[in-house]
Structures are given as C-alpha cells and as structure tokens.
Amino acid sequence: MRCPFCGCEDSKVVDSRPTDEGERIRRRRECFRCLKRFTTYEIVESTPLMIIKRDNTREPFSREKLMNGLLRACEKRPVSVDDIDAVIDKVETRLYSSIEREVPSSTVGEYTMEYLKDLDEVAYVRFASVYRQFKDIHSFMNELQKLLDEK
C-alpha cells in the first residue's frame, strides 16, 4: 500500500478490525520510510451476476423480481414468505456458486421450479405456466402429466 505522505510502497499493518457489520476491514498502517500512520479500508469486490434474457438482453440478477414471481405463483396457497425466501436463497446461492457471471434466465427458472416443486405443486404449476409460456392446454397437460409420473 502506497503511503499518502511520502509515496513509499512499503508499509506494515499495525491494527486491523472489521467495520460495518463485517462488510469492510479497517487497517491502520505505518510507513517504513516516514513512520507516519494512515488508515485503509478493504472491501470484498463482487462482480454482479447478469441474467441473459430470452431476447439476449442482459440485466443484473434481481432478488425482488424473483420474489414477485414467486409471490404471484404462491398466492392463496399455504406457503409462507419465509418458505419463499428460502427458495430464493437456494436459487441465489446456486447461481453465485457457479463459475459463470452471466446466466440464462432459463437456468434461473429451472432452479426455481426445482425447489418450488418440493414446496407446493400448485404454485409450481402456476410458475411453470408463466415461465414455460404454455401455448395451449396440451402443453399444460404434458407438464401436469410429468408431475404425476414423478409421484
């Protein structure tokens, strides 16, 4: 770390402590040349996760957008907001643990349906009907048949 007083690139860490609920690290440093002390802050650099939509446009991953879709799918169902949050947490963890920083929206939808299927089958079918854009009753029935075959 370069000293702001003399420009020397050698310094030592004298004190280090977390700030902002552990989001940043505050470091007190001392320059080897001029012996003056200065403070630096260290934060984790995060690359935003980008979602590639069907029309090939890209937008940052939005937890709120996924929440809205799940709330609509789970409307009037015995699914708590905590359950929905847990599904979103699982999807988000899976996406961020991937090496890829750009993920197709289809992947987000598939992960969501995978967890939603175990939570509530009616909500799963509702979500799938919007996500998969069923064109007719036959495509809807095919999805229901897959669900029944798994049981």
Image (cartoon, helix red, strand yellow):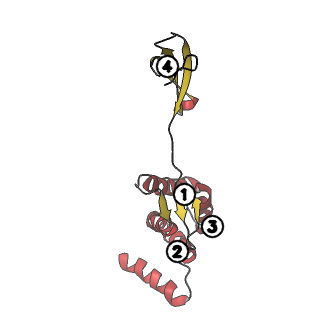
Which residue is identified by label 3? Answer: 72
**Which element carries disc 4, helix, strand or loop?**
loop
- Disc number lying in front (4 or 2): 4
In the depicted view, which residue is nearer to us: 22 or 89? Answer: 22
The residue tagged 2 is: 128
* Image point (49%, 54%), residue name: 92
The residue at the point 56 percent across, 79 percent down is: 133
Instruction: Count numbered badges in the picture.
Output: 4
- Provide the residue designation for mark 4: 8
Q: CA distance from mark 3 to mark 1?
A: 11 Å
* Image position, residue 77 (x, y; %): 58, 66
Mark sitting earlier along the chain (4/2) = 4
Between marks 4 and 1 in the image, the one whose residue lies nearer the viewer:
4
Q: Which quarter of the image is occupied by the C terminus?
A: bottom left
> Which quadrant would residue 21 be assigned to in this image?
top right
Location of residue 14 in the rendering, given as x and y in whole percent from the top left corner: 47, 15
For marks 4 and 3, give the CA distance.
Answer: 58 Å
Q: Residue at x 47, y 68 (%)?
A: 113
- The one nearer the camera, 79 or 97, is 97
Labels 3 and 1: the sequence-earlier one: 3
In three-dimensional space, the C-alpha distance between marks 3 and 2, rounded to whole angstroms, equals 12 Å
Location of residue 145 with respect to 39 vertically, above or below? below
**Residue 53 screen position, x and y as percent:** 56, 69
Mark earlier in primary sequence (3, 2): 3
Q: Earlier in the sequence, mark 2 or mark 1?
A: 1
Indicate which disc, 4 or 1, sits on the residue closer to the N terminus: 4
| SS type, badge 2 | helix
Q: Residues within 10 Å of mark 1 (few under 14, many from 20)?
A: some
Return the residue at label 1: 84
Amino acid type, mark 4: Cys
Gap between marks 4 and 2 measured at Cα:
60 Å
